[in-house]
Amino acid sequence: MDGKMSAPTQLQSAMEGLIEVFHSYSGKEGDKYKLSKAELKSLLQGELAGFLSASNDPLVVEKIMSDLDENKDGEVDFQEFVVLVAALTVACNEFFVDSIKSEEGKDGGSGCKTK
Amino acid sequence: MDGKMSAPTQLQSAMEGLIEVFHSYSGKEGDKYKLSKAELKSLLQGELAGFLSASNDPLVVEKIMSDLDENKDGEVDFQEFVVLVAALTVACNEFFVDSIKSEEGKDGGSGCKTK
């Protein structure tokens, strides 16, 4: 942001990815900077169908919408969206760490397990 | 997670990126699944030096560490890390949206500005 245009780091790319994804869906109708219910549904189905298989269930979309929409304006803004992504990423990370730990337990592992 | 191995979507890639970045730093010393203060500093400098220019300041690292380390164990776990990334991404998004809006104001814009 200070004029240096070096290649983005992996973390910067991930953050930009979150912003791009949000706007590629939020710009479709109504407020360009917020997700309507239809846009949220489209995002869940288009981006997370793989591990949020319930994203086809209208009741689940309704529930996620009402959970995320903290200010109850019927739309999900970027901050509310990031809360969902953060929660999902934490869940994925736990799954990932558990699977590594159980691998280590199986084959003796290579890392420090003494703490 | 159900055995289907289709290409990850942009959102999934971003989430995986966050997990990968965290573990590439957290695995260096001590608890492999948490960032020590040295690892956090290294992550801030390696990944965010571009737009967190204060990441070279030891006091700033100290402050971020104590803000993030909610459970006060002297280390930052993945959940605590995601809170930082979420806050930074929201700030970036606001910067991005503001710059689009001011562009639109300047040249007449192409989108809906009537709401």
Image (spheres, coloured by chain):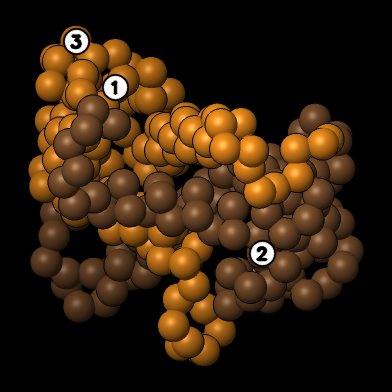
Chain colours: A orange, B brown
The quarter in which the N terminus of chain B is drawn is top left
Q: Distance between the residues labelled 3 and 1?
A: 10 Å
Q: Quadrant of residue B101?
A: bottom left
Q: Are marks 1 and 2 on the same chain?
A: no
Three-letter amino acid code of the residue under disc 2: Leu
**Front one among B26 and B11:** B26
Q: Is there any visible trace of residue A30 in the rendered image? A: no
Q: What element carries label 3?
A: helix
- CB-based contact (under 8 Å), mark 1 and mark 2: no
Pinpoint the chain carrying mark 1.
Answer: A
Pinpoint the chain carrying mark 2.
Answer: B
Q: How far apart are marks 3 and 2 (CA)?
A: 40 Å
Sequence-wise, which precedes: disc 3 or disc 1? 3
Lateral position of residue A73 relative to residue B23, left or right: left
Q: Do labels 3 and 2 share a chain?
A: no
- CB-based contact (under 8 Å), mark 3 and mark 1: no
Q: Quadrant of residue A64?
A: top left
Q: In this view, does A22 lie above or below B94?
A: above
Mark 1 crowd level (few <14, some 14–19, many ≥20, 10 Å Cα): many
**Which of the labelled discs sits on residue A114, or is there none?**
none
Q: In this view, does B108 lie above or below A86?
A: below
Q: Name the residue under label 1.
A: A65
Q: Mark 2 points at which residue?
A: B43
Q: Is residue B11 above or below residue A20?
A: above
Q: Mark 3 points at which residue?
A: A59
The quarter in which the C terminus of chain B is drawn is top left
Three-letter amino acid code of the residue under disc 3: Leu
| Image location of residue B32, percent across then percent down | 70, 47
